[in-house]
Image (spheres, helix red, strand yellow):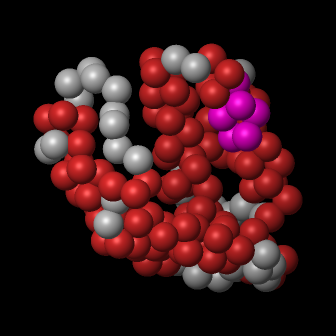
Amino acid sequence: MERLAAALRFYVSPRGRVGRKALFLWCFVPFVVLAALADRANNAAVSTAFWLLVAWPLFVALPWRRMHDMERRGAWNLVFYVFYAVGFAFFLGEYAASEGGWAALFDGTPPHTVDRDLTASGMGGFSTVLIFLPIHLVWLYAISGRAAEKGRSVS
C-alpha cells in the first residue's frame, strides 16, 4: 500500500524534484506504452480516458518537478503553455471555420477538411506548437539538474 501511495505522489504531486532518468523511465516510457494501447483500441472512450489519466502528470506535475531539479520554479513551464494555447487556438479556430463553425465539429459527421483548406493562420498556429514542443522537451530532458546533488530545496 505504501508503494501505491508513493507512486501516486510521484505522478500527481508537483512538489519535490525528479531527475532525467526517473522522468524518462516513469513518465515517458509508460506514456508511450499507454498511447500505443489507446491507439490500438481505436475507441474514443479509451482515448479520452487515456488523456484524462495522463494529462496532469505529463503536463503539470512532472515538468514542475523537473524544473525544481534544475533550480528553477515550476512556473517556468507556463511560458511554453502560453505558446501551446495560442498555437492550438489559431489552429482550432481555422479548422472550425473550414468545417462550417464550431457546432459542425460536434455534430457527429465525419470532417471534410483537408490540408489545402487551412490557411496560413491555422497552420501557423499548429507550427507554433511544433516549434515549441521540441524546445520544451529539450529543456526538460537535456539540461542536467544540479540542485538534487546539493540538497537544496526550490518550491
Position of residue 20 measured from the top left corner of the image (x, y, whole percent)? 80, 64
Q: In the rendered structure, which segment of residues is drawn in magenta?
A: 31-37
Left or right of residue 102, residue 127 in this image: right
Q: Is residue 89 magenta?
A: no
In this view, the residue in front, 86 or 108, is: 108
Position of residue 58 measured from the top left corner of the image (x, y, whole percent)? 58, 50
Q: Is residue 145 visible?
A: no
In this view, the residue in front, 112 or 134, is: 112
In this view, the residue in front, 130 or 79, is: 130
Q: Is residue 35 magenta?
A: yes
Q: Is residue 78 above or below residue 35?
A: below
Image quarter of residue 40: top right
Number of labels in the image equals 0
Residue at x-position 69% and y-position 40%: 31
Q: What type of secondary structure mainly makes up the magenta span?
A: helix
Q: Is residue 106 above or below residue 129?
A: above
Position of residue 113 measured from the top left corner of the image (x, y, whole percent)? 35, 44
Residue at x-position 46% and y-position 33%: 52
Left or right of residue 82, residue 59 in this image: right
Image quarter of residue 136: bottom right
**In the orientation shown, which residue stands out farthest toward the front?**
116
In this view, the residue in front, 123 or 72, is: 123
Position of residue 80 measured from the top left corner of the image (x, y, whole percent)? 47, 73
Left or right of residue 33, residue 66 in this image: left
Residue at x-position 72% and y-position 61%: 18
Image quadrant holding the N terminus, namely: top right
